[in-house]
Image (cartoon, grey):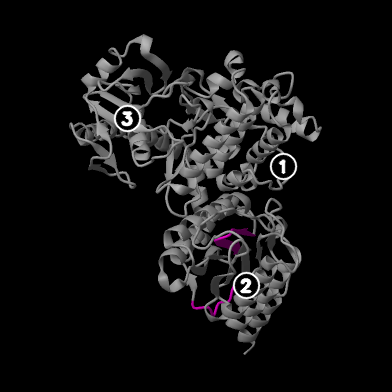
């Protein structure tokens, strides 16, 4: 009986302890006591605690917009229904006492509770949080080997939790580190997300766990949709049906292998180096062959005189949605690509003005004949733009491939790119605030369509004034989707080893870690907003006498209450200063260093609206982007559908 009673007493003690972490983001609005939202919230929290004991997971919503409240509760998979209900009741009471915000979450060791005025059910949003107790754990001996064994355990547990239905997205287990040392691990996801999203969330959390805690005797990473934990003492209930025990590692023989490795180190290193060189050259040859094969397949798929398009998953199909154009017609339209018709030059090719036989003016992007990157950009643009139709996106009219020739045909924008207006002293004088505000709203509407309203969720990754084109009515249209990426349903972030973009507009998390999301585009939008208001170029601002960066300059004047010094005098002549300063405020919200602090594009549309809305106080922008990336000057070229700059940037 003692063995059964002790775990139960332990679980009750933990459920009554302080929360591991509480998240009450100050950028969200507060609610008023006894308001409709507050009453709906109390009803929702009561419903969570009443229904949670049935399965250990429950989500619901209460009320009608705009006071509707969404909620979710999750208990750890190894506890009983009574302990689960007690934990959720305590968490519900604590979150009411600690947070007066319309979006909050609280984590306990045995449960978590979240509510929000926004719909979040079935959405995977990973934001790793680290409880203070992580800093109290002792260091381990042989941290490199410990990390390897730990990651083996946690990765196996994440597979169990995500892909074994009977586990209900919860798994716990153990693995031997040394004969007398055991590592215990636990992973769990909220059950409103798919298996794949659960695995993705756990993979991100385990990666953060390795970074923060793999040299310690214990660690926890918390997120909205998943949690991971490990320790050297058993912290979960062994009687749970979800317990998974993995094969013991051969810890007792490590010292012998270490001696053998030390004795044979010179020969081992030589063999490793030789093998690496051979493998590298074989891989390089194979990649070259694969590139040639892939390009040939693409040419075969597209190189017929038919209209083509590409489905959401990237497969080419025959269709009538995108016109296939003859190369001879394009040569005539551009006067054989004469220099007099040239609009811009980029890393993937050149852009020319052309006139089709029907008299319509077009912009033709002729991609580099020998560049496989050009082919990749071609395919990417056709994938993304062929399915996108919006007033604030440049329209793709057609495409074509003949032999080594690849070209894309766009609508022609008579006023070319935004940078030619805001950074040219003569043309700048032609812009009044109403025109600038219309351009800002046009860019925002285009981003809203890309991020939230189109059938494909698109992250642009290279938003800048060069890639914002203006038609004859000065309507802004976003262009150049060669670097854009599709985000599928519920995906919020992605990672890349090939960081591409333009100095001055790249979000810090993307420039330094390769992480990009919709919030990366928001950062770029904020930079453009500040450039339009000031008339100063972000990428040319570094180390001037005013400040280290344009963002630092805006931030300094904002804190000194000298915002009017930031505004271009041309805009002040016929404008209300309050509206301009409001846009400057929104720009500073967009360039905050933490992506979580930045507003979404739908939030920005509300803030830009005609109805006055209180704005949260911005936090310090990311000043380090300009110093943390290294630009290859040989790749800094100008290109565009009517003038687009492209550059390849790599973290130091």
Camera-side mark, 3 or 2: 2
Q: Residues within 10 Å of mark 2 (few under 14, many from 20)?
A: many
Q: What secondary structure is marked by label 3?
A: helix
Residue 272 lies, in percent from the top left, at 41, 38
Left or right: where does residue 305 sit relative to residue 63? left
Numbered mark located on residue 619 in the image = 1
Circle 3 residue: 375
Camera-side residue: 411 or 642?
Answer: 411
Assess whether residue 240 is covered by the magenta stretch: yes
Distance between the alpha carbons at the discs numbered 3 and 2: 53 Å
Q: Residue at x 63, y 59 (%)?
A: 219
What is the secondary structure assignment of the residue under circle 2? helix
State how far apart marks 3 and 1 are (Cα).
Answer: 41 Å
Percent from the top left, x then y, of residue 111?
A: 62, 70
287 or 340, which lies in front? Answer: 340
Q: Mark 2 — residue?
A: 44
| Figure quadrant of the N terminus | bottom right
What range is drawn magenta here?
A: 218-241
């Amino acid at each position: 009986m003692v063995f059964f009673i002790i775990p139960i007493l332990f679980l009750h003690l933990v459920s009554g302890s302080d929360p591991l972490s509480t998240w009450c983001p100050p950028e969200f609005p507060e609610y008023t006591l006894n308001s409709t939202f507050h009453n709906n919230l109390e009803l929702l929290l009561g419903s969570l605690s009443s229904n949670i004991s049935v399965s250990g997971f429950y989500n619901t919503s209460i009320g009608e917009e705009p006071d509707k409240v969404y909620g979710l509760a999750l208990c750890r998979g190894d506890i009983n229904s009574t302990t689960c209900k007690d934990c959720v009741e305590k968490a519900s009471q604590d979150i009411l006492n600690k947070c007066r915000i319309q979006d909050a979450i609280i984590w306990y060791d045995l449960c978590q509770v979240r509510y929000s005025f926004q719909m979040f059910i079935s959405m995977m949003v990973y934001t790793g949080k680290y409880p203070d107790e992580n800093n109290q754990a002792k260091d381990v001996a042989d941290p490199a080997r410990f990390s390897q064994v730990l990651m083996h355990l946690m990765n196996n547990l994440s597979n169990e939790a995500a892909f074994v239905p009977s586990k209900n997205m919860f798994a716990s287990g153990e693995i031997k580190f040394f004969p007398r040392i055991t590592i215990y691990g636990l992973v769990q996801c909220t059950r409103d997300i798919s298996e794949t999203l659960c695995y993705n969330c756990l993979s991100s959390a385990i990666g953060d766990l390795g970074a923060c805690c793999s040299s310690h005797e214990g660690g926890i990473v918390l997120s909205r949709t998943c949690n991971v934990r490990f320790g050297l003492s058993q912290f979960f209930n062994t009687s749970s049906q979800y317990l998974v025990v993995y094969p013991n590692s051969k810890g007792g023989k490590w010292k012998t292998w270490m001696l053998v490795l030390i004795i044979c180190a010179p020969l081992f290193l030589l063999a490793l180096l030789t093998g690496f060189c051979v493998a590298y050259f074989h891989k390089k040859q194979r990649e070259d062959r694969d590139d040639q094969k892939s390009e040939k397949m693409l040419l075969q798929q597209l190189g017929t005189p038919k209209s083509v398009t590409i489905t959401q998953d990237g497969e080419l199909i025959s269709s009538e949605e995108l016109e296939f154009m003859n190369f001879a017609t394009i040569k005539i339209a551009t006067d054989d690509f004469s220099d007099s018709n040239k609009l811009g030059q980029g890393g993937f090719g050149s852009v020319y003005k052309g006139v089709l036989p029907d008299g319509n003016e077009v912009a033709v992007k002729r991609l580099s004949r020998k560049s496989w990157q050009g082919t990749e950009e071609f395919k990417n643009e056709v994938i993304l733009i062929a399915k996108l139709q919006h007033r604030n996106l440049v329209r793709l009219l057609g495409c074509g491939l003949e032999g080594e020739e690849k070209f894309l045909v766009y609508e022609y924008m008579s006023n070319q790119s935004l940078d030619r207006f805001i950074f040219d002293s003569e043309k700048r004088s032609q812009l009044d605030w109403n025109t600038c505000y219309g351009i800002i709203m046009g860019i925002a509407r285009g981003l809203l369509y890309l991020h939230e309203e189109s059938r494909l969720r698109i992250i642009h990754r290279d938003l800048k004034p060069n890639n914002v084109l203006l038609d004859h009515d000065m309507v802004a249209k976003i262009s150049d989707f060669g670097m854009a990426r599709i985000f599928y349903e519920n995906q919020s972030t992605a990672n890349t080893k090939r960081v591409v973009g333009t100095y001055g507009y790249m979000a810090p998390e993307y420039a330094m870690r390769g992480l990009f999301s919709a919030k990366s585009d928001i950062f770029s939008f904020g930079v453009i907003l500040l450039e339009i208001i000031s008339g100063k170029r972000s990428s040319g601002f570094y180390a001037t006498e005013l400040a280290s960066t344009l963002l630092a300059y805006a931030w300094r004047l904002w804190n000194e209450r000298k915002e009017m010094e930031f505004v271009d005098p041309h805009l002040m002549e016929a404008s209300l200063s309050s509206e301009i300063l409001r846009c400057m405020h929104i720009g500073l919200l967009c360039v905050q260093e933490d992506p979580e602090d930045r507003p979404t594009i739908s939030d920005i549309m509300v803030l830009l609206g005609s109805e006055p809305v209180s704005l949260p106080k911005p936090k310090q922008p990311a000043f380090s982007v300009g110093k943390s990336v290294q630009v290859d000057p040989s790749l800094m070229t100008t290109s565009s559908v009517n003038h687009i700059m492209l550059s390849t940037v790599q973290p130091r």
